[in-house]
């Protein structure tokens, strides 16, 4: 017995009962299955990127025809003090955030990976809670807590007879306060990433090192760090992208002030959009992509490890 499906009939080995053969050939079926993703990726990633690239060579205010200006937007930005100032602010924030975050994240991950610590699951969840908390809500709390006149931090300083500090209103403290917000918000996520890397290390490696008399510090330096170097590299690259794209934190907490000291590269890009200068904003975004890509390649080069 046979059942016709398409141009041919298919017989099973038991003799008599037919199995339906799919309409699609095996070589074509995988491409059909991934077609929805490819279509969405092209529509929402590739096309907007190409459109933005073309837009960066034009003068367009959001309506009417775009006027071709060539490299004018790029030359304007490369000679603009605010553009370089925003990159400098982002670089300073990177120095205040990423090295501390990687070191503290690794030490906390090592402690959470220890078999001797109790309530490990609770601590893992506790470290992840700030990361999943809405950013705008956290930023508003930061504004209230670090307010110069009514903030809880200055209130605590007054209890010890210390004067009020303009945490968000002085160039000296605005960046560190913003960096502290970013550290509190995202360090837990880095801890979880590094913890996943630590759990891939065979425990017998540490047992052999302990038998040889290696201390905890020596094990951390000679075993843990080399074996999680790829995870460290991923964390550094990920946080470099996040810091140079930082927008909501300075927008809500300081609005780029005081005196543009917290105007990050991401916030400066937003200012072009609010002015309706979409061509310059597109050029700014591509220059930012080049900077971040260059930094990421440098970190990959420095932290890469041989198999």
Image: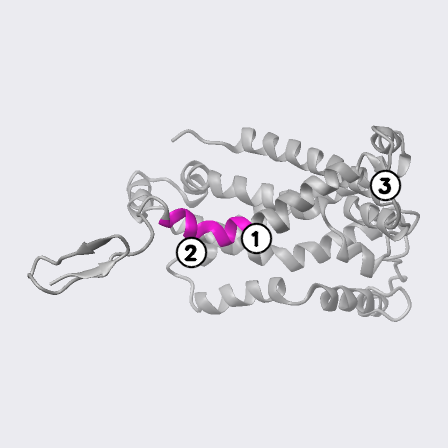
Q: Residue at x 86, y 56 (%)?
A: 255
User: In the visual, does 218 lie left or right of 233?
Assistant: left
Please say whether residue 242 is one of the residues in the magenta stretch: no
Q: How is the image coloured?
A: one colour
Q: Which residues are magenta?
A: 29-40
Distance from the alpha carbon under mark 1 to that under mark 3: 27 Å
Q: Residue at x 82, y 57 (%)?
A: 251
Which x, y percent locates residue 243? Answer: 70, 47
Q: Which mark is residue 111?
A: none
Q: Which mark is residue 66?
A: 3
In the depicted structure, whether residue 102 falls above or below residue 9: above
Q: Which residue is mark 1?
A: 40
Dot 3 crowding, Cα within 10 Å, few <14, some 14–19, many 20+: some
Distance from the alpha carbon under mark 2 to that under mark 3: 56 Å
User: Which of marks 3 and 1 precedes in the sequence?
Assistant: 1
Contact between marks 2 and 3 (CB within 8 A): the answer is no
* Residue 96 makes an appearance in the image: no
Quadrant where the C terminus sits is top left
């Amino acid at each position: 017995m046979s059942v016709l499906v398409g141009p041919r009939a298919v017989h099973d080995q038991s003799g008599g009962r037919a199995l339906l053969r799919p309409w699609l050939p095996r070589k074509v079926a995988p491409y059909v299955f991934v077609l929805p993703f490819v279509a969405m990726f092209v529509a929402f990633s590739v096309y907007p990127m190409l459109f933005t690239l073309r837009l960066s060579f034009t003068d367009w205010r959001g309506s009417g025809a775009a006027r071709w200006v060539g490299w004018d937007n790029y030359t304007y930005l490369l000679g603009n003090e605010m553009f370089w100032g925003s990159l400098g602010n982002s670089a300073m924030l990177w120095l205040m955030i990423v090295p501390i975050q990687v070191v503290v994240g690794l030490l906390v991950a090592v402690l959470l990976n220890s078999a001797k610590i109790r309530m490990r699951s609770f601590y893992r969840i506790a470290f992840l809670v700030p990361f999943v908390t809405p950013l705008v809500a956290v930023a508003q709390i930061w504004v209230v807590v670090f307010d110069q006149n009514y903030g809880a931090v200055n209130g605590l300083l007054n209890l010890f007879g210390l004067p009020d500090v303009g945490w968000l209103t002085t160039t000296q403290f605005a960046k560190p306060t913003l960096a502290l917000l970013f550290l509190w918000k995202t360090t837990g996520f880095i801890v979880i990433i590094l913890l996943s890397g630590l759990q891939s290390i065979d425990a017998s490696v540490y047992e052999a090192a302990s038998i040889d008399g290696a201390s905890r510090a020596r094990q951390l330096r000679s075993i843990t760090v080399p074996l999680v170097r790829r995870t460290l590299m991923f964390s550094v690259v990920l946080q470099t992208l996040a810091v140079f794209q930082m927008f909501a934190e300075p927008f809500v907490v300081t609005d780029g002030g005081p005196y543009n000291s917290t105007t990050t590269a991401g916030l400066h890009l937003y200012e072009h959009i609010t002015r309706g200068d979409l061509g310059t904003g597109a050029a700014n975004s591509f220059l930012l992509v080049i900077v971040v890509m260059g930094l990421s390649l440098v970190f990959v080069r420095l932290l890469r490890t041989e198999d």
